[in-house]
């Protein structure tokens, strides 16, 4: 079966009794690992137990297809149900998984992580169709999920967070669950001994690392500055940030810019239009957004959002590398800003 987004949390807490195998696929590696650990702990409390948790690389299974079925059927030395965890999988694992599903008499929970695997892949289809298996998509968080992850992490340290601080984090952290929780943990350490987290705390603790790369990429695209965009994308790649997380931030920014562009078209000044946004724009980003408001009209912003939405769909449904898709889409936005932006300023 394929697990719908709205049902994932319930599925992870109370998986079906007959569940034998789960595939986690998509672009958000941090979320994938978090969910894989959650489902594994329903079987084995200590994931470091070498007798009940067996980890395999997909390459090992491709070279020895029977290895997966053998490990799933083997009885743990200390007793209890096992977890067989396969990492870095792709469609090349399909035949080994099919052979496993056709083989009776195994009791282990098989977990497969498949970063960058498209939703229409053969492996996803196989897990989605088998009664004892499940396929779970893992894509960058939307704003509500980012806020929930931040609040949960801070609450575990006894901290509350001010609304404007939460708005800053949701706007700047991007969509990778692992990055979000890591930055929230860093913020919690920064605020140790306090009862609440202010916006100033959020900016001081994570603004220098999480926000700069995303802000540079967005500004490079929407201000029509390809070199700045390329440098930002290179830095984010080196930091291990998911390309689809960057795309999520850019799409969210595009929708905010569309509101500003509409206000300017209706007669507001760029400065007044930016100040009218809610939640408020962080002061360091306001000047850039005003410049963009002078370059983009509502119809041009709609075209840019269309490019980003199409790229998002391609990342989720094709086997093309997400890094290339996202880079091409953002460079296309930068080209629009350079070409149509001059026309906008001229008029």
Image (tube, grey):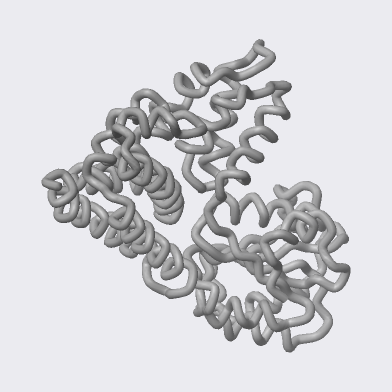
Image label count: 0
Residue drawn at 65 percent across, 17 percent down: 196
Judge left or right: residue 24 versus residue 223. right
Q: Nearer the viewer, residue 144 or 104?
A: 144
Q: Nearer the viewer, residue 303 or 28?
A: 303
Judge left or right: residue 345 versus residue 101. left
Q: Looking at the figure, which quarter contains the N terminus?
A: bottom right
Residue farthest along the top direction in this orientation: 193
When the figure is inspected, residue 19 is found, relative to residue 35, above or below; the finding is below
Residue 329, image quadrant: bottom left
When the figure is inspected, residue 148 is found, relative to residue 2, above or below; the finding is above
Judge left or right: residue 262 versus residue 328. right
When the figure is inspected, residue 122 is found, relative to residue 290, above or below; the finding is below
User: Can residue 241 be seen in this snapshot?
Assistant: no
Q: In the image, residue 187 lies at what x, y percent?
A: 55, 24
Q: In the image, residue 88 lies at what x, y percent?
A: 51, 64
Q: Nearer the viewer, residue 270 or 310?
A: 270
Judge left or right: residue 166 versus residue 111. left
Residue drawn at 65 percent across, 63 percent down: 85
Q: Nearer the viewer, residue 329 or 194?
A: 329
User: Can residue 300 be seen in this snapshot?
Assistant: yes
Q: In the image, residue 53 lies at what x, y percent?
A: 72, 58
Residue drawn at 45 percent across, 51 percent down: 248
Residue 104, image quadrant: bottom right
Residue drawn at 58 percent across, 78 percent down: 123
Q: In the image, residue 175 lies at what x, y percent?
A: 51, 47
Residue farthest along the front direction in this orientation: 267
């Amino acid at each position: 079966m394929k697990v719908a987004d709205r049902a994932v949390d319930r599925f992870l807490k109370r998986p079906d009794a007959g569940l034998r195998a789960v595939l986690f696929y998509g672009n958000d590696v941090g979320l994938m690992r978090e969910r894989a650990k959650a489902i594994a702990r329903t079987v084995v409390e200590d994931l470091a137990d070498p007798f009940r948790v067996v980890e395999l690389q997909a390459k090992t299974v491709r070279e020895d297809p029977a290895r997966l079925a053998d490990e799933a059927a083997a009885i743990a030395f200390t007793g209890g149900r096992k977890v067989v965890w396969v990492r870095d999988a792709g469609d090349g694992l399909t035949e080994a998984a099919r052979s496993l599903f056709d083989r009776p008499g195994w009791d282990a929970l098989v977990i497969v992580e498949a970063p960058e695997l498209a939703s229409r892949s053969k492996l996803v289809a196989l897990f989605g169709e088998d009664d004892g298996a499940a396929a779970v998509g893992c894509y960058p968080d939307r704003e509500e999920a980012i806020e929930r992850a931040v609040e949960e992490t801070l609450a575990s340290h006894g901290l509350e967070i001010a609304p404007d601080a939460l708005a800053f984090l949701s706007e700047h952290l991007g969509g990778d669950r692992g990055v979000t929780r890591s930055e929230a943990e860093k913020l919690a350490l920064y605020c140790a001994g306090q009862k609440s987290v202010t916006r100033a705390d959020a900016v001081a603790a994570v603004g220098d690392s999480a926000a700069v790369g995303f802000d540079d990429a967005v500004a490079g695209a929407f201000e029509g500055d390809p070199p700045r965009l390329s440098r930002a994308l290179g830095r984010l790649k080196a930091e291990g940030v998911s390309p689809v997380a960057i795309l999520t931030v850019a799409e969210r920014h595009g929708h905010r810019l569309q509101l500003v562009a509409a206000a300017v078209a209706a007669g507001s000044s760029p400065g007044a239009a930016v100040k009218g946004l809610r939640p408020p724009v962080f002061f360091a980003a306001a000047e850039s957004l005003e410049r963009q408001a002078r370059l983009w009209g509502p119809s041009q912003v709609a075209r840019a959002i269309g490019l980003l939405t199409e790229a998002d769909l391609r990342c989720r449904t094709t086997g093309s590398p997400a890094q290339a898709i996202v880079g091409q889409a953002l460079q296309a936005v930068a080209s629009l800003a350079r070409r149509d932006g001059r026309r906008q300023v001229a008029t």
